[in-house]
Image (spheres, rainbow, N blue to C red):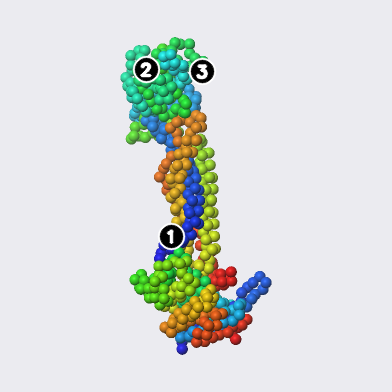
């Protein structure tokens, strides 16, 4: 299986006033095109740091991240932005939908940035909202949606440009158990439809759905 | 959705912030607009006043100053000489005296008495009746134009008899008063508030002064020929009579601009700069607070691959909408404020009634919008810089921890 992303002996140290803090120590991980990887571990063990490195929003202190075979460190900020836009889909714990845009417009935004023709992006948005079960809420603002609905819109937005990898940071962290289950169902479908997933979660039920579970402790994989 | 569309939605979403910003900018903008009107208003109004006389050259004795003129000796001959100059057209003599005017049975009123050889015109506008006659009238004929407030005060109208007695210094002349007849009522361009004015012919003034010869003019007005222009006419007059001082309207305006008007310009510049700084700080503060409230949202967008440029242009458009909205509202607000301030400032003593401090000019509107465009750009600069440098990962982490 081809790797979408390879993490090779990565260390991430944050300079702090009280002294440097190593959030990751010599971590290696590979996520294949068909993988659904769940990372769990106690708070502060470096899960989100690893996710941010894989998602190309942060750079390692040492080691290398290869995204689809390309060393991310050699890419310009613009190239990394392009990868995030077209090859990676981000799902956040707090959704980060634009409050002034409707569900449909939120899903269209990354496509517009990627210069997808208007007719194509309208069709894609319709399909995606239907896919996450929100076709009838397309013209609602985030403030008019429940937490679970907002997260489903965020997943549709993350899938908008047909990414190779979906990264999710505590996607059920703000949701109740039942709504979390619905989100986990959506993730299952996304994975079954051929998108690799890397999810950081404290939710054992969500982690149990993954094809591979990784435990982290004190900045290292266990 | 375009960056402008996003900015518009954001502005509508944070409606209270937008209303506060637009209101603040509108009030500050109104002050700025007024400063721009004030910075040239008095000058423009003064120039308009000068030009309204219909003459573009003024000739004075070198012994006096424009506000305290002395008679030009043998001015009638001077007028004849000036008329021979090819650079000049019409030439008119003017003599100004203090006088008292009285209607039959009424109390005397102190007036500025203007004697002129001007035919059929002058720096006044006829309200009722006729202008001064073009041809000299019969001996002992004394046609007068009364300023409108004076006519109202005397209860006089065209056809009414009045008596004029010239004053020498602060003393009333021992000569008997001259019987005159009102031929018209006019608005005088240069009269100040509560100043009464009377215009008559030079011949009538001579009779009122009890002179055997026509009085010497203290001001000669002339019109330059369009093909030569005022500057060439001034040079020709000074060549002909080096003992006199000639000014074109432009010379007078330039002197006024340099001397009497410098204070207004400096005050206007200082206050304009301050208002610009206030507008910039207001919008920059609101945008910065707004950006700080939306850091997670912005970091999320950046993580999704939305470019810095898109976010920067969205913020720039937000700034333009806030500043532009306020700037537009500032125009009617500033115009209304200018009208009120103009009325207040015109209460100052000694100012011609037709002089205005605030005069509308399109260039003021253009400058207003140019300054506001610059303000919008500067106000957006810091929030844009903030978002451009935003560390995505640590911001996302902080948002979750907070």
Q: Is residue B392 above or below residue B280?
A: below
Alpha-carbon neighbours of circle 2 within 10 Å: few (<14), some, or many (≥20)? Answer: some
| Residue furthest out toward the right | A18
Among numbered discs 1 and 3, the one appearing first in the sequence: 1
Residue at image coords 50%, 78%:
A178
Check disc 1 and report its element: helix, strand or loop: helix
The CA distance from mark 1 to mark 3 is 71 Å
Residue at image coords 43%, 60%:
B8
Alpha-carbon neighbours of circle 1 within 10 Å: few (<14), some, or many (≥20)? Answer: some
The chain containing the residue under callout 1 comes to: B
Q: Nearer the viewer, residue B142 or B340?
A: B340
Residue at image coords 56%, 69%:
B399
The chain containing the residue under callout 3 comes to: B
Alpha-carbon neighbours of circle 3 within 10 Å: few (<14), some, or many (≥20)? Answer: few
**Residue occupied by mark 1:** B8
Does residue A202 appear anywhere in the picture?
A: yes
The mark lying in front, picked from 3 and 2, is 2
Q: Nearer the viewer, residue A172 or B315?
A: A172
**Residue occupied by mark 3:** B169
**Residue occupied by mark 2:** B160
Q: Is residue A15 above or below residue B89?
A: below
Say whether marks 1 and 2 touch (CB < 8 Å): no
The mark lying in front, picked from 1 and 3, is 1
**Image quarter of the C terminus of chain A:** bottom right
Q: Are marks 1 and 2 on the same chain?
A: yes
The CA distance from mark 1 to mark 2 is 69 Å
Q: Where residue A5 sits in the image (x, y, percent)?
A: 49, 82
Q: Quadrant of residue B4?
A: bottom left
């Amino acid at each position: 299986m081809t790797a979408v992303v390879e993490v090779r002996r990565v260390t991430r140290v944050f300079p702090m006033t009280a002294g440097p803090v190593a959030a990751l120590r010599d971590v290696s991980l590979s996520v294949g095109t068909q993988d659904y990887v769940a990372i769990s571990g106690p708070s502060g063990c470096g899960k989100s740091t690893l996710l941010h490195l894989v998602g190309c929003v942060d750079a390692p202190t040492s080691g290398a991240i290869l995204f689809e075979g390309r060393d991310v460190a050699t890419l310009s900020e613009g190239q990394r932005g392009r990868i995030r836009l077209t090859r990676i889909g981000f799902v956040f714990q707090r959704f980060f939908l634009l409050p002034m845009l409707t569900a449909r417009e939120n899903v269209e935004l990354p496509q517009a940035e990627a210069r997808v023709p208007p007719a194509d992006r309208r069709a894609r948005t319709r399909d995606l909202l239907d896919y996450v079960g929100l076709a009838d809420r397309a013209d609602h603002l985030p403030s008019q949606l429940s937490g679970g609905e907002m997260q489903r819109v965020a997943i549709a937005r993350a899938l908008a440009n047909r990414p190779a990898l979906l990264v999710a940071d505590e996607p059920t962290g703000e949701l109740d158990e039942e709504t979390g289950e619905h989100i986990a169902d959506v993730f299952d479908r996304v994975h079954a439809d051929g998108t690799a997933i890397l999810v950081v979660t404290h939710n054992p039920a969500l982690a149990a759905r993954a094809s591979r579970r990784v435990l982290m402790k004190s900045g290292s994989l266990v | 959705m375009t960056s402008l569309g996003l900015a518009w939605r954001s502005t509508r979403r944070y409606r209270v912030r937008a209303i506060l910003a637009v209101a603040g900018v509108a009030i500050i903008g109104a002050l700025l607009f007024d400063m721009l009107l004030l910075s040239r208003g008095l000058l423009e109004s003064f120039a308009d006043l000068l030009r309204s006389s219909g003459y573009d050259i003024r000739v004075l004795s070198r012994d006096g100053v424009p506000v305290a003129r002395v008679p030009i000796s043998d001015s009638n001959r001077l007028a004849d000489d000036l008329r021979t100059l090819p650079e000049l057209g019409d030439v008119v003599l003017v003599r100004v005296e203090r006088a008292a005017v009285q209607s039959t049975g009424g109390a005397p009123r102190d007036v500025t008495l203007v004697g002129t050889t001007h035919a059929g015109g002058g720096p006044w506008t006829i309200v009722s009746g006729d202008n001064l006659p073009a041809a000299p009238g019969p001996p002992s004929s004394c046609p007068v134009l009364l300023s409108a407030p004076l006519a109202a005060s005397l209860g006089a109208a065209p056809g009414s008899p009045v008596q004029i007695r010239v004053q020498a210094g602060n003393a009333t002349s021992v000569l008997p008063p001259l019987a005159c007849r009102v031929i018209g009522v006019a608005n005088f361009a240069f009269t100040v508030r509560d100043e009464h004015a009377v215009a008559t012919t030079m011949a009538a003034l001579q009779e009122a002064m009890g002179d055997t010869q026509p009085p010497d003019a203290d001001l000669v007005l002339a019109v330059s020929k369009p093909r030569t222009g005022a500057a060439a006419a001034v040079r020709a007059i000074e060549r002909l009579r080096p003992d006199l001082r000639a000014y074109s309207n432009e010379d007078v305006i330039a002197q006024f601009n340099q001397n009497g008007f410098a204070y207004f310009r400096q005050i206007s510049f200082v206050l304009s700069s301050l208002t610009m700084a206030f507008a910039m700080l207001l919008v920059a503060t609101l945008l910065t607070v707004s950006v700080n409230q939306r850091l997670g949202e912005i970091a999320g967008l950046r993580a999704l691959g939305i470019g810095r440029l898109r976010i920067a242009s969205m913020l720039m458009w937000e700034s333009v909408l806030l500043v532009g909205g306020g700037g537009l509202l500032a125009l009617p607000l500033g115009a209304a404020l200018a009208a009120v301030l103009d009325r207040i400032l015109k209460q100052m003593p000694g100012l011609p009634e037709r002089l205005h401090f605030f005069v509308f000019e399109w260039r003021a509107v253009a400058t207003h919008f140019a300054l506001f465009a610059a303000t919008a750009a500067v106000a957006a600069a810091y929030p844009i810089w903030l978002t451009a440098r935003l560390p995505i990962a640590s911001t996302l982490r902080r948002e979750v921890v907070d």
